[in-house]
Amino acid sequence: MKKTHTFFLLLVSMVGFSQKEKDSIQPTPLDEVIISIKLPTNLAFLPNQVKAITEKQIDFQNFQSTAEMLSNSGSLFVQKSQQGGGSPVIRGFEASRVLLLVDGIRMNNLIFRAGHLQNVITVDESFLENVGVFYGPTSTLFGSDALGGTVAMTTKKAKFLDEAKNPFTGKINTRYSTVNEEKSVAFQLNYATTNFASLTALSYNDFGDLKMGKRKNHNGDFFGERPFYVATINGVDQLIANDDKYVQKNSGFKQYNLMQKLTYKTSSGFEHGLNFQFSTSTDIPRYDRLTETSSSTGLTHAEWYYGPQQRVLGVYSIAKNKAFLGSDLKVNAAFQNAKESRHNRRFGNYTLQNREENVNMYSVAADLKRKFTKGELFYGFESYFETLKSTAYSNNINTGVENTISTRYPNGDNSMLRNDLYVSYNERISAKTFWNAGARIGYTALKSTIADDQFFPLPFSSISQGNFTYSGTLGIVRSTSNNFTLKANLATGFRVPNIDDLAKIFESVQGTIIVPNEDVKPEKSVTADVGFVIQSTSQKTKFETTYFYTRMYDALVTDEFFYNGQSVIVYDGTPSNVFANQNKGKAFITGISSSFLVSLCSNVNFNASFNYNLGRVVEDGNQSPLDHISPYFGKIGLTYNSSKLNLDAYMLYNGKKDVKDYSNSGEDNLQYAPIGGMPAWETYNFKLGYAIFEDATLFAGVENILDTQYRVFASGINSPGRNFYGGLQYAF
């Protein structure tokens, strides 16, 4: 890896700055920038807050999944309803309000819900080259859903011979963890010639039942232990005493991942690429639902699980420098398929309900970049067409008798079409000042039909919407000296309602039903960021703080609703309070994010981060808590790095989420928290990487050293207890 300063000056030389200007620049010490045709050449030029997680960091931290890698970064919050999950939260925005990208392709689809998601785990962390976390609205660059931010995951590329050095290169990773008896292996093989490259990557993960901590959290009491679970023996549900109440019985699963990339360069300067990704899993138990109690049977559910979560991505790309009006061009044509299903039945009820969703996404995008003497222009278009087939049936687990039941989404034809144009320009207007401006316009059309409403009569048989969308951004970076930099950014964002927002019938918790509301409109936001960076002349010390204020308009909030004049209806045999997604007028989120880095000596660094958010819904002059707002959180650590040995000792911490700050929407999952709200917690962790010899590295560590029993806000499963892990990486 090149030294940051050398790399930075190389990038500067590419955009034609004078030597005097080059000498005046004080680069942000990122280990590695994220190269994308939609972004400035170096992230130090961006006026908005960005976090880069590099391949080297991902390999060393050696976490079990991409969700764990993100949550342990100290840069964003991750909610979990089950072990096989992980829903990133950025600045109080989650799920469909945070955009997930894989190699520049949207993962968000027409059924991404506003609650909690687990899709991020379908991207294996061992396949990643880097991850960019963009804070605040990034709709101008990336489109709808990027209200709170964007998680841009870039997978490893196939390397040509000039990069790989040898025709055949590769890597094998293994890992074992005690906290869930995890057994993981990943294999990568790169074949390289001068103009052809192939990368094959495979991984397998076996996660057993997760063990929680046994030591009481000093900020609270014991909570979330698993004294009983349900087993079906000879066709009869039985409540079984757990041999170890600290083992979260029925939380394990397995996952399989495959990636194949092919790249070919022609003599005329074109580069063709094929990118195929596949991920699937075994059934994933919905652990939070399995722990819900009943006064009559002990536990409410005998079974509640997600079926295999399958993601297929196929991309054909073609790229050429100076292909159009002096602009570099890249065109992607992609197909995605996402399958998910929900399966549940109550204790003593032997009819299993099965609801299955099959989503197809077709997309075409053209991204262009034009360099000028002191600036860069980015522009292009995107088109996405998505379809959904929603089906449902029940089957008796003893007799096998099947029946039709209500679907989660409309059971007719469901589709969504997005067409966007965007432009962004970045320029250095003086030796110490950069500015950025951008805009996006688009049109989104949604159509949904209800073929059969026998289970839940609706006052309409179809839903169709057409929404004109727009967003913009304007920012500036000003270095007042070699030691002080000011950043300011103003950006708007939008999120177009999807099928999940408009047409879903959903039991959030027992006794609460969410019904369709065809009158919802797009959410919009305006965010102002103001920040500064202070770093020493030697670049050994850096302090960065960003304050933001977001104002949401037409914010979609799940709240009490009247359905056909009734506030309570019977659903699935249970009287349920009626809720619906509604544009509740206005809401605001404000907060601060700070980081501190100091080089204590040539090999030792101290780092710390702190994040705080506050969100409120504003209605008729009154304020109420907005959902998904995490308590304050961060990370404090000490690292040692040498050519053979890397050490990392760090503390992760979270503040308390008091019961008065929980939203009444149900999305904060108060029912899965102790009385009074979720207590504060902290964990202490230690990791090492040691180069046994040139091509082999041993990774080992212990997480949650004190074996603290705790649960993350809004989660439905306790976090891992003390975990010893070890693994070996061999490169060839």
Image (cartoon, rainbow, N blue to C red):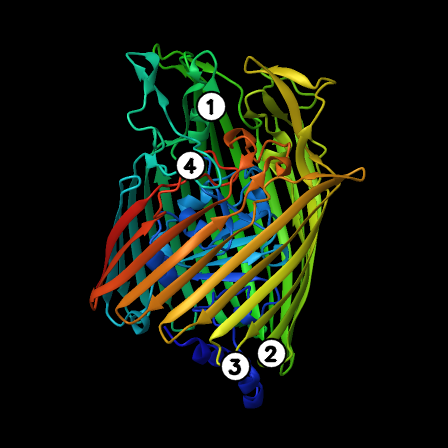
According to the picture, the residue beneath numbered tag 2 turns out to be: 372
> Is disc 3 surrounded by few (<14), some (14 to 19) or many (20+) residues within 10 Å?
few
Q: Secondary structure at mark 4?
A: loop
The answer to which of 140 and 211 lies nearer the viewer is: 211
According to the picture, the residue beneath numbered tag 1 turns out to be: 292
Q: Name the kind of residue labelled 2 in the image.
A: Phe
Q: Secondary structure at mark 2?
A: loop
Comes first in the chain, label 1 or label 4: 1
User: Separation of disc 3 and disc 2 at Cα?
Assistant: 30 Å
User: Separation of disc 1 and disc 4 at Cα?
Assistant: 14 Å
User: Separation of disc 4 and disc 3 at Cα?
Assistant: 45 Å
Q: Residue at x 55, y 60 (%)?
A: 366
The N terminus, quarter of image? bottom left
Left of 476 or right of it: where is 717? left
Q: Secondary structure at mark 3?
A: loop
When the figure is inspected, residue 105 is found, relative to residue 575, above or below; the finding is below
The answer to which of 95 and 483 lies nearer the viewer is: 483
According to the picture, the residue beneath numbered tag 4 turns out to be: 718
Q: Is residue 445 visible?
A: yes
When the figure is inspected, residue 149 is found, relative to residue 533, above or below; the finding is above
> Is disc 1 surrounded by few (<14), some (14 to 19) or many (20+) residues within 10 Å?
some
